Image (spheres, rainbow, N blue to C red):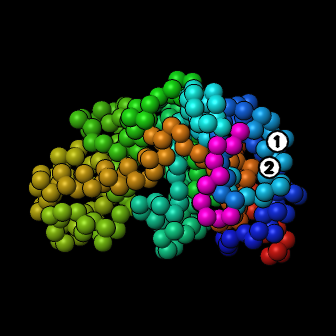
């Protein structure tokens, strides 16, 4: 898979020949006149804002005539979207960007993505959505392939009127981004936290662990040698057993725990979730930076990247 920037001519071809209004998801179609649309017309950033469309045909006309570099729609619904006024409610969204994962399973350079880190982003998105649906009981959860990762978009009335600080609590919950007061509970946040801790600790290499304040090299070696045992202790909530590992001690253990918790929180960009006036890449549109389509993913397990490859790329490279 090779990702490269689309040319202006390819953008025009995409919107004239390939863009399909049926790929605009229902949750946007049904509320189209209440959303603010934003565009990056030339690759310099989404500066064309405050657009309003009454129908999807109008949106299509705009896309075909301007062939934007990027297209976005607000997560919020407004009484007057063209003035960004009269905020009514907003989807709850989580952005899992493969290029920004705190622990990448691959060696691809900062700002790039490859199939391995996209796969990691897919797994993270699945884990988050399981908690949103299971623990928090939310419905109408959609996955979107964004071009460089995945968006989770929740259109459940019970969260759409939440304010930014309440959304931040949802982020903390699904990411395991705060240390719970009790590690041992078999259900609820305590369990989510332990699962996230296991995932993060498993993915850590020794170099990363050396960043923990006060953690000596010999202890890092020990933690690595006894990784599976430590993971088992986390699973069971026996965190005090870890702190009694030789050479660790309660204070350094606390630093380690805080370090891992911070990493947990970095698996999504919390700023996206708390911003209730955000514009988010429009499913059906082209991500010109990587020449991939932004698409609703009906089945997260079966989604293949090839589904998002536009025709001009497939034809161009045989
Ligand atoms: Zn990668």
Front position in the image: 274 or 312: 274
Magenta run includes residue 43: yes
Considering the image in quadrants, where does the N terminus appear?
bottom right
Residue 43 falls in image quadrant: bottom right
Dot 1 and dot 2 residues touching (CB under 8 Å): yes
User: What is the distance, in whole Å, between disc 1 and disc 2 at their CAs?
Assistant: 6 Å
Q: Position of residue 67 (x, y in %)?
A: 78, 59
Q: Residues within 10 Å of mark 1 (few under 14, many from 20)?
A: few
Considering the image in quadrants, where does the C terminus appear?
bottom right
Q: Which residues are magenta?
A: 42-52
Question: At numbered mark 1, what does the secondary structure look like: helix, strand or loop?
Answer: helix
Q: Is residue 29 visible?
A: no
Q: Is residue 111 visible?
A: yes
Provide the residue designation for mark 1: 58
Q: Position of residue 191 (x, y in %)?
A: 36, 38
Q: Is residue 109 above or below residue 271?
A: below
Magenta run includes residue 100: no
Front position in the image: 120 or 109: 109
Q: Position of residue 119 (x, y in %)?
A: 57, 59
Provide the residue designation for mark 2: 62
Q: Residue at x 80, y 49 (%)?
A: 62
Q: Residue at x 75, y 62 (%)?
A: 309
Q: Is residue 126 above or below residue 255?
A: above
Residue 135 falls in image quadrant: top left
Furthest toward the front, the residue is: 83
């Amino acid at each position: 898979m090779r990702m490269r920037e689309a040319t202006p001519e390819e953008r025009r071809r995409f919107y004239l020949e390939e863009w399909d209004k049926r790929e605009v998801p229902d949750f946007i179609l049904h509320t189209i006149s209440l959303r603010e649309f934003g565009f990056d017309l030339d690759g310099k950033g989404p500066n064309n804002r405050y657009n309003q469309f009454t129908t999807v045909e109008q949106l299509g006309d705009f896309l075909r005539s301007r062939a934007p570099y990027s297209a976005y729609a607000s997560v919020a619904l407004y009484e007057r979207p063209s003035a960004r006024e009269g905020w009514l409610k907003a989807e709850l969204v989580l952005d899992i960007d493969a290029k920004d994962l705190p622990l990448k399973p691959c060696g691809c350079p900062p700002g790039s993505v490859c199939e391995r880190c996209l796969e990691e982003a897919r797994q993270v998105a699945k884990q988050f959505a399981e908690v949103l649906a299971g623990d928090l009981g939310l419905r109408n959860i959609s996955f979107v392939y964004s071009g460089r990762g995945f968006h989770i978009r929740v259109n459940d009335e019970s969260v759409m009127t939440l304010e930014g600080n309440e959304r931040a609590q949802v982020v903390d919950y699904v990411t395991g981004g705060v240390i719970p007061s009790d590690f041992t509970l078999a259900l609820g946040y305590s369990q989510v936290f332990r699962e996230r801790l296991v995932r993060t600790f498993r993915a850590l290499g020794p170099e990363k662990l050396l960043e923990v304040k006060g953690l000596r090299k010999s202890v890092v070696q020990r933690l690595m040698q006894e990784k599976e045992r430590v993971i088992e202790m986390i699973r069971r909530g026996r965190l005090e057993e870890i702190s009694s590992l030789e050479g660790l001690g309660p204070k350094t253990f606390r630093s380690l725990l805080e370090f891992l918790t911070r990493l947990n929180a970095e698996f999504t960009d919390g700023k996206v979730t708390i911003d209730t006036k955000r514009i988010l890449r429009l499913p059906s549109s082209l991500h010109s930076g990587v020449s991939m389509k932004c698409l609703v993913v009906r089945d997260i397990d079966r989604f293949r990247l090839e589904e998002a490859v536009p025709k001009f790329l497939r034809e161009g490279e045989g």
